[in-house]
Image (cartoon, rainbow, N blue to C red):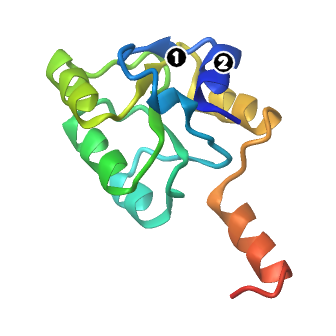
Amino acid sequence: MQLNTIVTQLALTRLTPTLTAQEKADVARGYASDLLSDVLANAPGGGLLVTVQAHVNALAVALHAGLAGVVFASGHVPDGDVVAKAAEEGMPLYTSGACTFEIVGQLYALGLRGPQAAAAAGTAAGGV
């Protein structure tokens, strides 16, 4: 599903509205965590991160992990310098008044899955 469709379906607020080209990315997986080392170790590349960690380190982790975007839950919004850096780096940022649990449930209902689903599918298909 394209990121822009997810944004519309969840009524997310765009914090980086100039990044429309990045919103054409296909996103099939996601991850929710507030522990950034966990995100680095487990978030699926090309996936969508849901977190309340609205600071520059969250942006750095999202960029390093190759994520498609970051959704800040519970109305959290990063400072303007973080938003400006995200726009410069091409990382779409969004915010929602909904809590992490609700956002993840909505993403699951749209068909997004976590990283374990992809790993399990690869193992079932004979992958390692």
Residue highlighted by disc 2: 10
Image quarter where the N terminus lies is top right
Indicate the position of residue 47 as horizontal and vertical percent values: 55, 47
Residue occupying the point 54% across, 58% down: 44
Residue occupying the point 36% across, 46% down: 62
Please give left or right for residue 54 compared with residue 47 in the image: left
Taking depth in this image into account, of 40 and 86 the one nearest to the observer is 86
Indicate the position of residue 123 as horizontal and vertical percent values: 77, 81
Give the secondary structure at mark 2. loop
Residue highlighted by disc 1: 96
Taking depth in this image into account, of 48 and 20 the one nearest to the observer is 20
Q: Please, is residue 128 above or below residue 49 in the view?
A: below
Indicate the position of residue 122 as horizontal and vertical percent values: 75, 76
The span from disc 2 to disc 1 (Cα, nearest Å) is: 8 Å
Please give left or right for residue 105 compared with residue 12 in the image: right
Q: Residue furthest right?
A: 124
